[in-house]
C-alpha cells in the first residue's frame, strides 16, 4: 500500500473514532442515570463504647460515658459506684452504617465509628458489641471489632503530632446482618424508574428506548410511560412472566442520549468554574483591565551628626511610596451563538484569570447575553 493511501486510511479511521467518541460522550446507560424506586440503602445507627485506648479516651467530665460503662458492668453482675469510676481508656461513640438492598442475614457490612465525647484518639481501640437500629427502632445488625483509624496522635502538650482524623474510624465487615429488609420493586404490576437528574427530554427518551426494546417481545410484556421530568413508570402487562431481574437487567443496559440544561457552576472560594458545551451567548463586547494601587513603606534610620547637642537620638523615619499601575484593557467582540470554546479562547486573549472570569460571567449574565443558568456554590 502506498504511503498516501495509508495516510488516507488512518485519517478516515481517526474521523470514525472521533465520531464514535463524540456520540458516546452524550450517551449513557439507563443504570447510570436512573434508579429503581424502592431499591435503596437504609441507614443504621447505634451507640456503643470503645475500650483499650492508651489514655486517649473520654475525660472524667464526660458523664454519659461513665453512666454507660457502669450500666454495662451492672448488667454483667458487677456493682460499681459511678462517682468512683475514673477511666481514660474508654470512649463513647456513635456507630453508623448503610444497609444495602437485597442483603441477607449472615452477611457483613462496613461501619463508621465516631467519637461523641472529648476523646483525643480511637487508635488501638476495640468496639464492644453494639446493636444497630433502623428508623423503625428495629435491630438489623450487630457490630464488634477493632477500630481502624487510618491516622495517629503522638506526643502530648505542645510536643505532639497528628495525622488525619484520629477520632473517627472504620470496622471493615464488622457488622453482622441479623434482619433482612424486603424490597418489593415490582408490586402491583408496576415498576417506577427515577432519574437522578430531572429532565423532561431525558425522561421521554428513556421511555422511547424501553418501548423500542420491548417491541421485540410478542406479546409486549410492559409499556414505559413518562410521568414527569424525573419519573418513568413501567406498566407490566398480564403476559409478564414475573422475572423482574431479567427485565430490569435488559432495561439498565439500554443506551440513550441524555439531555441537560445549559449551566455554569462557579465556586468563588476556590476559583473553580465548570461550564457545559451547551452554553451560548448573544452579541456582546467585553473589555477587561486591571488597576493596581501599591503603597510601600520603607523604614529608614536617621542618626544625629557628630557633635550634636545633648539629647539627640537615633530615630526611625518611615518613607512611603505610592504607585498606580493600570494595565491596557482589550475589547473582545463575541458574536451571537458563540460556543463555550469560543468564549474561553476570547477571554484568554485578554488575559482573564479564573477569578476574573467569574466577574466577567456575572456581568454577561446581568447584560442578558448569557443563555445559561449561573449557579454559585
Image (cartoon, rainbow, N blue to C red):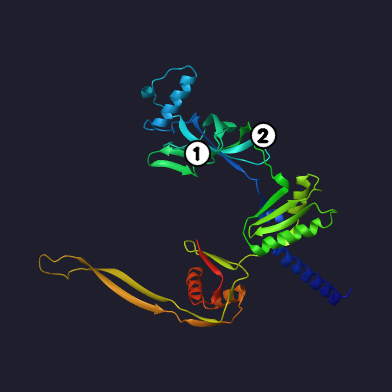
Residue at 74 percent of width and 59 percent of height = 255
- Say whether disc 1 or disc 2 marks the residue closer to the N-terminus: 2
Q: In this view, does 157 lie above or below 129?
A: below
What number is the disc on residue 341? none
Residue 163 position, x and y percent, is: 49, 44
Quarter of the image for residue 278 reads: bottom right
Can residue 20 be seen in the rendering of this structure? yes
Q: In this view, does 283 lie above or below 125?
A: below
Q: Is mark 2 on a helix, strand or loop?
A: loop
Can residue 257 be seen in the rendering of this structure? no
Q: Mark 1 points at which residue?
A: 114
Q: How crowded is the residue under tag 1: few (<14 C-alpha within 10 Å), some, or many (20+)? A: many
Q: In this view, does 150 lie above or below 230?
A: above
Relative side of 198 to 125, left or right: right
Q: Name the residue under label 2.
A: 107
Q: Is residue 13 above or below residue 246?
A: below
Quarter of the image for residue 108 reads: top right
Residue 105 position, x and y percent, is: 67, 32
**CA separation, marks 1 and 2?**
23 Å
Residue 88 position, x and y percent, is: 42, 29
Residue at 50 percent of width and 36 percent of height = 94
Q: What element carries label 1?
A: strand
Residue at the farthest right position: 1
Relative side of 118 to 47, left or right: left
Q: How crowded is the residue under tag 2: few (<14 C-alpha within 10 Å), some, or many (20+)? A: few
Amino acid at each position: 500500500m502506498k504511503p498516501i493511501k495509508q495516510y488516507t486510511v488512518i485519517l478516515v479511521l481517526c474521523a470514525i473514532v472521533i465520531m464514535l467518541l463524540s456520540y458516546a460522550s452524550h450517551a449513557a446507560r439507563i443504570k447510570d442515570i436512573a434508579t429503581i424506586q424502592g431499591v435503596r440503602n437504609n441507614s443504621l445507627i447505634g451507640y456503643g463504647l470503645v475500650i483499650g485506648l492508651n489514655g486517649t479516651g473520654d475525660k472524667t467530665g464526660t458523664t454519659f460515658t461513665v453512666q454507660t460503662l457502669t450500666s454495662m458492668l451492672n448488667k454483667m453482675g458487677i456493682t460499681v459506684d459511678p462517682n468512683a469510676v475514673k477511666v481514660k481508656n474508654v470512649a463513647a461513640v456513635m456507630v453508623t452504617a448503610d444497609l444495602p438492598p437485597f442483603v441477607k442475614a449472615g452477611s457483613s457490612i462496613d461501619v463508621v465509628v465516631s467519637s461523641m465525647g472529648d476523646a483525643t484518639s480511637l487508635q488501638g481501640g476495640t468496639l464492644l458489641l453494639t446493636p444497630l437500629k433502623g428508623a423503625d427502632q428495629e435491630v438489623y445488625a450487630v457490630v464488634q471489632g477493632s477500630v481502624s483509624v487510618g491516622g495517629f496522635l503522638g506526643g502530648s502538650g505542645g510536643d505532639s503530632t497528628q495525622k488525619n482524623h484520629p477520632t473517627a474510624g472504620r470496622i471493615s465487615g464488622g457488622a453482622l446482618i441479623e434482619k433482612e429488609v424486603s424490597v418489593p420493586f415490582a408490586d402491583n404490576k408496576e415498576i417506577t424508574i427515577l432519574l437522578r437528574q430531572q429532565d423532561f427530554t431525558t425522561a421521554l427518551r428513556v421511555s422511547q428506548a424501553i418501548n423500542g426494546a420491548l417491541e421485540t417481545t410478542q406479546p409486549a410484556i410492559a409499556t414505559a410511560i413518562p410521568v414527569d421530568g424525573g419519573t418513568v413508570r413501567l406498566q407490566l402487562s398480564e403476559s409478564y412472566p414475573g422475572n423482574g431481574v431479567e427485565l430490569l437487567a435488559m432495561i439498565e443496559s439500554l443506551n440513550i442520549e441524555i439531555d441537560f440544561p445549559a449551566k455554569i457552576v462557579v465556586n468563588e472560594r476556590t476559583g473553580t468554574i465548570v461550564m457545559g458545551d451547551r452554553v451560548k451567548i448573544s452579541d456582546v463586547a467585553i473589555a477587561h483591565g486591571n488597576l493596581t494601587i501599591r503603597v510601600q513603606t520603607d523604614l529608614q534610620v536617621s542618626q544625629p551628626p557628630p557633635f550634636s547637642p545633648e539629647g539627640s537620638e537615633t530615630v526611625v523615619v518611615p518613607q512611603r511610596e505610592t504607585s498606580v499601575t493600570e494595565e491596557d484593557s482589550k475589547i473582545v467582540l463575541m458574536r451571537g451563538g458563540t460556543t463555550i470554546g469560543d468564549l474561553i479562547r476570547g477571554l484568554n486573549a485578554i488575559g482573564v484569570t479564573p477569578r476574573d472570569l467569574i466577574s466577567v460571567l456575572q456581568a454577561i449574565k446581568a447584560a442578558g447575553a448569557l443563555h445559561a443558568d449561573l449557579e454559585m456554590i
